[in-house]
Amino acid sequence: MENWFELRLPALSQNEKFARTTAALFALQAGDWSLVEINEIKTAVSEAVTNAIIHGYHECCGEIIVSGTVAAGVVEFTISDAGQGIADVETARQPLFTTKPEHERSGLGFTVMENFMDEVEIDSTLGQGTKVKMTKYLLRKVQ
């Protein structure tokens, strides 16, 4: 059976922790994740929410939608904003690329998401916002 949730949050940095904790707890419904996998999910969601706050809304005045679905062995999270959007998604996906060097940002957000989740899709339109969809599969080795 599939289950889902949706959070609508102001684009405030303190809501990042709430979003990632909610996502981790929700993911537990998919099965027996390892602690490492749960931390990967939390980190990926945290990066996506932080990107929306800092890059989408420039830390001011917007709404972030965090949603998730869970079914046997798979979780999917979508983080959406109606912020400024990304001019070039492929460039933004490159390690160390940042639009905020003055804030000492490392430019690893998308790299982290792509390494910690099994699938990452980014849909962005300038002036309309960004949607990041991340999927993780629960895979266990047969012993």
Image (spheres, grey):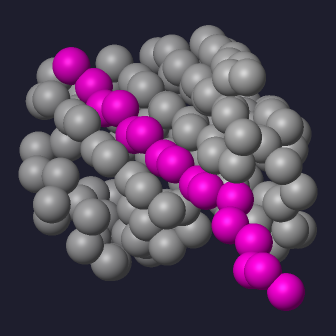
Judge from the rendering whether residue 24 lies leftward or rightward of residue 62; answer left or right.
right
Judge from the rendering whether residue 14 lies leftward or rightward of residue 47; answer left or right.
right
Residue drawn at x 54%, y 20% is 65
Image height of 40 relative to 30, above or below = below
136 magenta-colored: yes
- Quarter of the rendering containing residue 108: bottom left
The quarter in which the C terminus is drawn is: bottom right
Judge from the rendering whether residue 60 lies leftward or rightward of residue 126; answer left or right.
right
Query: Which residue ends up furthest to the bottom in the rendered image?
Result: 143
Query: Which residue ends up furthest to the front in the rendered image?
Result: 143
24 magenta-colored: no
**Residue range corresponding to the magenta coloring:** 128-143
Image height of 14 relative to 82, above or below = below
Q: Find residue 67 and report its horizontal and vertical position in percent.
A: 59, 24
Q: Find residue 114 and report its horizontal and vertical position in percent.
A: 44, 66
- Quarter of the rendering containing residue 58: top left
Image height of 143 relative to 119, above or below = below
Residue drawn at x 34%, y 18% is 82
Image height of 25 relative to 125, above or below = below
Q: Nearer the viewer, residue 19 or 54?
A: 19
- Quarter of the rendering containing residue 76: top right
Residue drawn at x 56%, y 37% is 77
